[in-house]
Amino acid sequence: MGIVVPAVLPSSKHELEEKLELFSRINSVSRVQIDVVDGRFASPASWPYIAPAELHTMVASGEMLPHLDRLVYEIDLMCLDAESVIESWLALGVSRITFHAESASNVQRLLSSVRRRYGAGGLAPLISFGLALNIASDIALIELCIGEIEFVQFMGIVNIGRQGQSFDERVFEKIRIFHARHPDIPLQVDGGVSLEQVKKLVALGVSSIIIGSAIVRSSDPAAAIAAFEELQSPYGV
């Protein structure tokens, strides 16, 4: 499995479908992250918050995300009502959920609640839950919840919910410290990653890199992904 996970931040249902069709045609892509921004926790708002009726219609009609036979979808919930929207995304076929540690007044309670409802023995026992951490936040926010998550996502940019930002190198030290303490927890980084940071991130223990604008704005998205994948060994092998 490659290290690159393409991300789409949709401004409309049409754009989401268009990007997912694009990713489905790239053989190296097996996972896709859909970024969801509510306009309150992060801004500007993305689809479906700008057209909530469309999501409701999809769920009510039994419509699911395309290409579920070959793509695993994860949803990055940059929103304050994360728990209340999970069920809709699960109905569409999402199987990995990323919450943000700063989005809830009590993130431990949030994770415990969703795990009871949707985790092992719940409504969707095959779902994986992860926790994202903003660049300025203390890693203690995540460490309080280690028992409730399968992976951690470190944000590599200051203003989450916006593609095309520069990478913030402060995340290197956060990853180093966290991975030293918790070496068995899979790590991913989202935001601003360019080719020059990949080897260092892999050397620090990162196994997945979420990449948005560097792929979707490329004239050749498949070649852009391949360029990142070629650097996945920290030793240049």
Image (cartoon, helix red, strand yellow):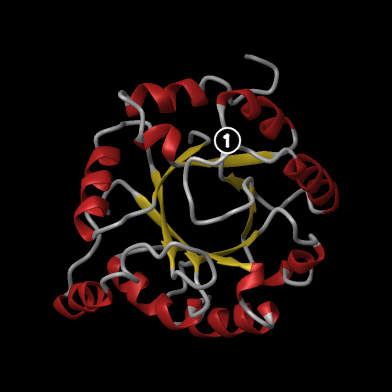
Residue at 24 percent of width and 51 percent of height: 15
Q: Please state which amino acid type lies under the numbered disc 1.
A: Val
The spot of residue 151 in percent (x, y) is: 62, 57
Q: Is residue 1 visible?
A: yes
Residue extending furthest toward the front: 44
Q: Is residue 57 above or below residue 17?
A: below
The spot of residue 74 in percent (x, y) is: 43, 57
Residue at 65 percent of width and 14 percent of height: 236
Q: How many residues crowd around disc 1 within 10 Å: few (fewer than 14), some, or many (20 or more)? A: many
- Local SS, label 1: loop
Residue at 48 percent of width and 66 percent of height: 77
Q: Is residue 103 above or below residue 157?
A: below
Q: Is residue 61 above or below residue 131?
A: below
> How many numbered discs, if any?
1
Q: Which residue matches tag 1?
A: 193
Q: Along the line of sight, which residue is nearer the eye, 215 or 3? A: 215
**Image quarter for residue 223?**
top left
The spot of residue 166 in percent (x, y) is: 59, 37
